[in-house]
Image (cartoon, helix red, strand yellow):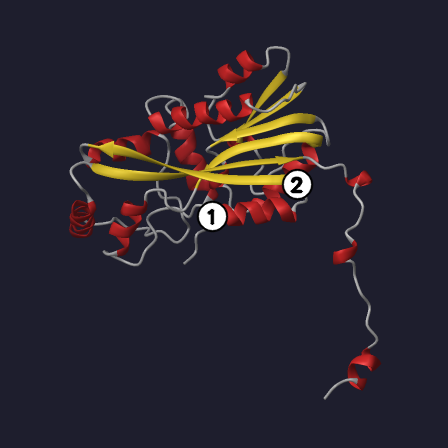
Amino acid sequence: MDQTIEITSWLQNLSRHKVQRDKGWVLSQEVAQRLMDRLAGIKIHPERILNITACSHILEPSLKQSFPQSQTTTLDLLSLPLPSLSFGCESKSVDLIISNLAFYWVDDLLALFQEIQRVLKPGGLLLFTTLGPDTLLPLRQAWQAVDDMPHVHHFWDLHDIGDALLYTSFADPVMDVERLTIEYGQLADLWQDLKSQGETNCLIARRKTLTGLRRWRAMLEQLDMLKAGQYQIPFEINYGQAWGVDFAKTKPNNDNAEVLVDVASIKKYKQ
């Protein structure tokens, strides 16, 4: 199933709810605080900070309070020339790149991390959170029981993110995960939270016609079967940390060096 996001729909959704993304959703506020708590435990004195967001400025006050002497720039994903993901920053110019709950909107992790690696100074820090695949799991399961169309976005697995950091040559990448649960007394509150954040279905493979009352009710019945008292909706929070590399000083790994083999020698030992 195609999990690619339709960029135009995504931009429209985020733009429509830009003012609301910092208000009303306890999840983004809670995760932002946890991210700042982790940053407080790292000895770093950045001159330039890049805050990568998806229509959210929730980290700005905390960053300015923690690093009043730093030059902090907020880069909204809406402003990027998608899908190229060019930040428009000088190479090796940023000491700290931080992002809260934004990377899951990006289809191409390698392109994202390559651009971050380009901009980040050697020894600079990348620190971020993003949503993992257990996010909204009951909602995904309820829809899967009703039809075979995608209704919930794909979220990057922890190991996929770690592999992408290694592939793009970040130093000492560390990934870990937390699972948070939000209890909703009624589903209308969940829909309002998701809608207020622009978190609606933007997948290219989504159903382009109306869902229909029968299918919608069938999904709600599946959710009712999954709930225990209130609707308990899980959110998997992946935390990532890695450091920029000075490629000019990086020595090649001899274990991974290219080895040339004469074709004749292969034929010689062929059984």
- Name of the residue lying farthest toward the bottom: 271
Q: Is residue 222 left or right of residue 269?
A: left
Q: Earlier in the sequence, mark 1 or mark 2?
A: 1
Q: Residue at x 71, y 27 (%)?
A: 93
Q: Separation of disc 1 and disc 2 at Cα?
A: 18 Å
Q: Nearer the viewer, residue 107 or 45?
A: 45
Asked whether residue 145 is in view, the answer is yes
Disc sitting over residue 170 in the figure = 2
Q: Nearer the viewer, residue 158 or 200?
A: 158
Q: Where is residue 194, by image quadrant?
A: top left
Q: Nearer the viewer, residue 223 or 201?
A: 223
* Residue 168 position within the rendered picture, expressed as x and y whole percent measured from the top left: 66, 45
How many marks are shown on the rendered structure? 2
Q: Residue at x 38, y 29 (%)?
A: 16
| Quadrant of the frame with the C terminus | bottom right
Q: Residue at x 54, y 21 (%)?
A: 40
Three-letter amino acid code of the residue under disc 2: Phe
Q: Secondary structure at mark 1?
A: loop
Q: Secondary structure at mark 2?
A: loop
* Residue 53 position within the rendered picture, expressed as x and y whole percent measured from the top left: 50, 29
Q: Residue at x 36, y 42 (%)?
A: 135
* Residue 239 position within the rendered picture, expressed as x and y whole percent measured from the top left: 49, 36
Q: Is residue 173 left or right of residue 149?
A: right
Q: Nearer the viewer, residue 231 or 103?
A: 231
Asked whether residue 88 is in view, the answer is no
* Residue 115 position within the rendered picture, expressed as x and y whole percent measured from the top left: 65, 38
Three-letter amino acid code of the residue under disc 1: Asp
Kindly identify which residue carries mark 1: 157
Q: Is residue 245 above or below residue 208?
A: above
Disc sitting over residue 89 in the figure = none
Q: Where is residue 41, by image quadrant?
A: top right
